[in-house]
């Protein structure tokens, strides 16, 4: 903290004059960028529709209430498909993410020069593309349906699970590994008895957390034809059946709340 004396009085300053100028210049640059971006967005926005949005929202709300409760009988299979998409996709991703994580971790990869970069590339590539994009690509390849949704969720989840898991592997207690290695254990024995027991809690937490996320993502995959309750939502939106839309949204909300409660209970049991 800089100190200056003026008239015999000591003045404490948080920053020097140069630091203050740099700070204010940074704020000025940020403000200029914000104004430029706002100008571009404003030029591409039809403000009439924005001003009219409250009236349109009120009109849709009046059309969507009350929900069409008798339609719930047709949502049993779609919501079950949605849960299956999330669950099977998560299980498949975990089976594939575990070996990728061990190949990506510094302390378990067989080659930091060749194997680890490939594993990291898999992690980055699967995480960088949204599940909806994967679903669109897979629908073009294997056709629409639940299977495309399962594969899309699985591919999207590989990078997420592998990244968190390989970070957990790199943070293990090396003393335990060294102790088991000193007994003459093989590489696989060291992994089974020295590494796996340490990462099991993290693995269980990652699995539950990702399943909870996949429940949310799988509800919208039907919008692009990948099955689940999103397909019913898209059909209702196409015919402007707003009472059905409001009911579907309530069912989705209930499913998400239930998955959140289940995942919280499982995490409490693990921790």
Image (tube, rainbow, N blue to C red):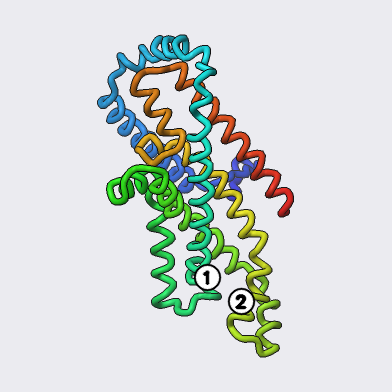
Residue located beneath label 2 in the image: 191
Q: CA distance from mark 2 to mark 1?
A: 10 Å
Is 189 placed above or below 147 here? below
Residue at the farthest left position: 43
Is 157 placed above or below 165 here? above
Q: Residue at x 61, y 76 (%)?
A: 191
- The kind of secondary structure element at disc 2 is helix
Is 76 placed above or below 20 here? above
- The kind of secondary structure element at disc 1 is helix
Residue 206 spot, x, y in % from top left: 59, 54
Give residue 102's mark: 1
Return the disc, 2 or 1, that comes first in the chain's sequence: 1
Q: Residue at x 43, y 67 (%)?
A: 119
Q: Residues within 10 Å of mark 1 (few under 14, many from 20)?
A: many
Residue 267 spot, x, y in % from top left: 68, 49
Frontmost residue, 89 versus 206:
89
Total marks in image: 2
Q: Is 88 placed left or right of 178 in the picture?
A: left
Is 45 placed above or below 148 here? above
Q: Residues within 10 Å of mark 2 (few under 14, many from 20)?
A: some
Q: Residue at x 64, y 65 (%)?
A: 199
The answer to whether the residue labelled 2 contacts the one labelled 1, judged by CB atoms less than 8 Å apart, is: yes
Q: Give the image quarter of residue 32.
A: top left
Residue 145 spot, x, y in % from top left: 38, 43
Frontmost residue, 16 versus 65:
65
Q: Residue at x 37, y 50 (%)?
A: 129
Residue 43 spot, x, y in % from top left: 25, 25
Q: Quadrant of the C terminus?
A: bottom right
Frontmost residue, 131 versus 67:
67
Q: Give the image quarter of residue 30.
A: top left
């Amino acid at each position: 903290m800089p100190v200056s004396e003026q008239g015999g009085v000591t003045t404490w300053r948080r920053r020097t004059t140069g630091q203050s100028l740099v700070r204010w210049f940074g704020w000025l640059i940020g403000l200029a960028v914000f104004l430029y971006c706002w100008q571009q967005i404003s030029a591409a926005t039809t403000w009439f529709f924005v001003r009219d949005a409250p009236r349109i929202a009120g009109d849709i709300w009046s059309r969507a209430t009350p929900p069409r409760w008798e339609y719930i009988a047709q949502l049993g299979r779609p919501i079950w498909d949605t849960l299956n998409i999330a669950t099977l996709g998560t299980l498949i991703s975990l089976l594939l993410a575990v070996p990728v994580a061990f190949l990506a971790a510094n302390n378990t990869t067989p080659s930091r020069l060749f194997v680890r970069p490939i594993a990291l590339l898999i992690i980055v590539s699967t995480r960088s593309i949204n599940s909806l994009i994967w679903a669109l690509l897979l629908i073009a390849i294997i056709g629409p349906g639940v299977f495309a949704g399962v594969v899309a969720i699985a591919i999207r989840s590989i990078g997420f699970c592998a990244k968190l898991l390989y970070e957990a592997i790199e943070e293990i207690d090396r003393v335990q590994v060294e102790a088991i290695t000193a007994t003459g254990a093989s590489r696989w024995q060291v992994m089974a008895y020295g590494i796996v027991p340490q990462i099991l809690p993290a693995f269980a937490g990652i699995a539950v957390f990702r399943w909870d996320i996949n429940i949310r993502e799988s509800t919208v995959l039907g919008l692009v034809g990948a099955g689940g309750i999103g397909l019913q939502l898209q059909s209702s939106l196409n015919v402007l059946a707003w009472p059905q839309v409001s009911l579907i949204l309530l069912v989705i909300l209930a499913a998400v709340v239930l998955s959140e409660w289940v995942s919280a209970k499982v995490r409490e049991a693990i921790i």
